[in-house]
Image: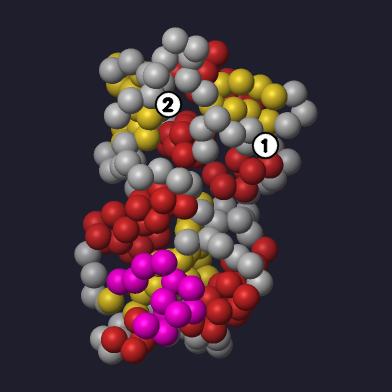
Amino acid sequence: MRILLAEDDPDLSRQLKASLQDAGYVVDHAPDGEEAHFLGDTEPYDCVILDLGLPKIDGVSVLERWRRDGKTTPVLILTARGAWSDKVSGFDAGADDYLTKPFHTEELLARLRALVRRAAGHAQPLLVCGGVRLDPRAARASVNGEPLRLTSLEYRLLHYMMLHQNRVISRTELVEHLYDQDFDRDSNTIEVFMGRLRKKIGTERIETVRGLGYRLKPLHNEVSEI
């Protein structure tokens, strides 16, 4: 999953970025509201972590602009302010959840997982597609009960496809959601890792839709059960 972290505190930004990357997320960082608005307006993110007290443009104003422009990306707001009115302002601007500083990183990660999961239409924390199961909380996956050994990129690829199973996903969409803004978008890496993932979960589970992309689906004799 690709996350935009809009936070001006250098120490907190480094800490959060490291924790998010350790949890398997790709992270772009914006140190002020101006850059946050630009990135959120031009790049496709699975979720945004947005500090309300940003310089140049405050977080509420950034969020209001995104929502006014039709951006529906889930937004988790961070604030050092304890006043209930600031939380209300954030929600009224279009926020989906909030955390008040200081907070525990594990709580932020749990809220982030829930936002990404709900945005993709999943109520259960465990993602299941036939015999393939993925637990975002533990960053583990299995096929028919057998644990999968995945690289970080293979895990991110499977996670994204599990969230959007039974839907055709283009190569461009995968690149946009699995790599940060500095990645070479002309790379053929996706095809390489897609081939490796097929070998690990079963070639028939990932369908190539010619000219459109890939689709993850259960085998004909499989039923997706939690």
Say how many tags the image has. 2
Residue 83 location (% of width, % of height): 28, 89
**Residue at point 49% right, 79% down?**
93
Q: Position of residue 100 (x, y in %)?
A: 28, 76
Label 2 sits on a secondary structure element that is strand
Secondary structure type for disc 1: loop
The residue depicted at 59 percent of the width and 28 percent of the height is: 215
Give me the residue at 68% from left, 31% from top. Answer: 213
* Residue 196 in view: no
Indicate the position of residue 224 as horizontal and vertical percent values.
38, 24
* Residue 151 in the image, given as x and y percentages of width and height: 42, 31
Image quarter hosting the C terminus: top left
| Nearer the camera: disc 1 or disc 2 | 2
* Mark pair 1, 2: CA separation: 19 Å
Question: Is residue 191 shown left or right of residue 211?
Answer: left
Is residue 135 among the parts visible in the rendering? yes
Report the residue marked by disc 2.
129
Which residue is under mark 1?
170
Is residue 95 magenta-colored?
yes
- Indicate the amino acid at tag 1: Ser
Is 173 on the left-hand or right-hand side of 92? right
Q: Residues within 10 Å of mark 1 (few under 14, many from 20)?
A: some
Which disc, if any, is residue 13?
none
Q: Which badge, 1 or 2, is on the more N-terminal residue?
A: 2
**Along the viewing direction, whichever of 21 and 158 lies nearer the viewer:** 158
The range drawn in magenta is 88-99
> In the image, is 76 to the left or to the right of 37?
left
Q: What amino acid type is highlighted by mark number 2?
A: Cys
Rendered position, 167 above or below 112: above
Dot 2 surroundings within 10 Å: few (below 14), some, or many (20 or more)?
A: many
Residue extending farthest to the right is: 211
